[in-house]
């Protein structure tokens, strides 16, 4: 996947996350105000229009003529289309450790930034480890934390916007990681997604240092 295509897919990821976060491999028709979309994305309407045009060329979204400031979008079976673009074989060869990628991009992900969810779960995890030891099973609390954080649109949107920003300046290694992130999102529940799990644990580990 080249840099331009990675930007397109990262924008599509952001768009779909806002419009239909639970959309599976199915078709969908959706009408949205372009100004509302610009406000949610915190992005200029001209930039949004440019990417919508590119997504139409990529076959990911059919953009129909809108009226009164609205845009009509038709999503095809996007899982199938995306998997034509993403190098699935390369992804399936190894489920890469996301730690290095997240460390490299920690300024984008605001790992050091205090977050109410992370602070709460960091304290809960620390108390659990203090009580039951460092090797206690954290899978249940990790699953609960990731699900709660990503259940809110503002958190999903922030994360998808971050991925989009990374795609705009990605090097070859970054592109491979972005490809994996999209693949994981298409094929795994959020609590089993290596990217989400690693990002959550990285933020938790940082926060625990200050408890």
Image (cartoon, rainbow, N blue to C red):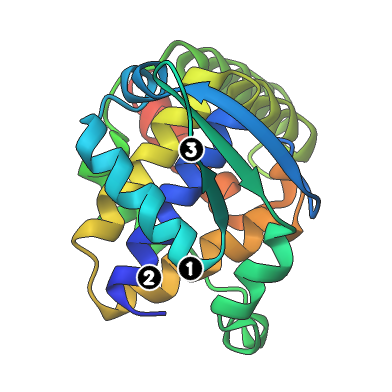
Q: Is residue 173 above or below residue 166?
A: below
Mark 3 crowd level (few <14, some 14–19, many ≥20, 10 Å Cα): few
Residue under pointer 3? 65
> Residue 173: where, in percent of width, then height?
32, 77
Q: Of discs 3 and 2, which sits in the foreground?
A: 3
> Residue 113: where, in percent of width, then height?
28, 24
Q: Is residue 52 above or below residue 120?
A: below
Mark 1 crowd level (few <14, some 14–19, many ≥20, 10 Å Cα): some
Gap between marks 3 and 1 measured at Cα: 18 Å
**Residue 74 falls left or right of residue 115:** right
Q: Residue at x 64, y 53 (%)?
A: 185
Mark 2 crowd level (few <14, some 14–19, many ≥20, 10 Å Cα): some
Residue under pointer 2? 5
Labelled pair 3, 1 in contact (Cβ < 8 Å): no
Q: Is residue 117 above or below residue 164?
A: above
Labelled pair 1, 2 in contact (Cβ < 8 Å): yes
**Occupied quadrant, residue 171:** bottom left
Labelled pair 3, 2 in contact (Cβ < 8 Å): no
Quarter holding the N terminus is bottom left
Q: Of discs 1 and 2, which sits in the foreground?
A: 1
**Residue 78 falls left or right of residue 67:** right
Q: Of discs 3 and 1, which sits in the foreground?
A: 3
**Occupied quadrant, residue 85:** bottom right
Residue under pointer 1? 58
Q: Residue at x 34, y 79 (%)?
A: 2
């Amino acid at each position: 996947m080249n840099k331009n295509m990675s930007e397109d897919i990262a924008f599509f990821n952001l768009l779909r996350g806002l419009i239909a976060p639970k959309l599976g491999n199915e078709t969908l028709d959706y009408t949205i105000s372009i100004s509302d979309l610009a406000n949610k994305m915190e992005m200029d309407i001209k930039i949004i229009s440019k990417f919508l045009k590119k997504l139409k060329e990529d076959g990911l979204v059919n953009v129909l003529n809108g009226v009164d400031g609205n845009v009509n979008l038709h999503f095809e079976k996007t899982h199938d289309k995306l998997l034509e673009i993403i190098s699935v074989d390369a992804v399936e060869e190894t489920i890469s450790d996301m730690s290095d990628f997240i460390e490299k991009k920690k300024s984008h992900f605001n790992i050091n930034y205090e977050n109410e969810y992370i602070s709460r779960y960091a304290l809960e995890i620390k108390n659990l480890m203090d009580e039951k030891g460092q090797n206690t099973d954290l899978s249940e609390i990790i699953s609960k934390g990731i699900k709660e954080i990503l259940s809110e649109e503002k958190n999903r949107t922030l994360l998808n916007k971050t991925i989009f920003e990374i795609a705009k300046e990605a090097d070859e290694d970054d592109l491979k990681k972005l490809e994996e992130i999209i693949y994981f999102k298409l094929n795994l529940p959020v609590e089993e997604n290596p990217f989400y799990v690693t990002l959550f644990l990285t933020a938790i580990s940082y926060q625990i240092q200050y408890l």
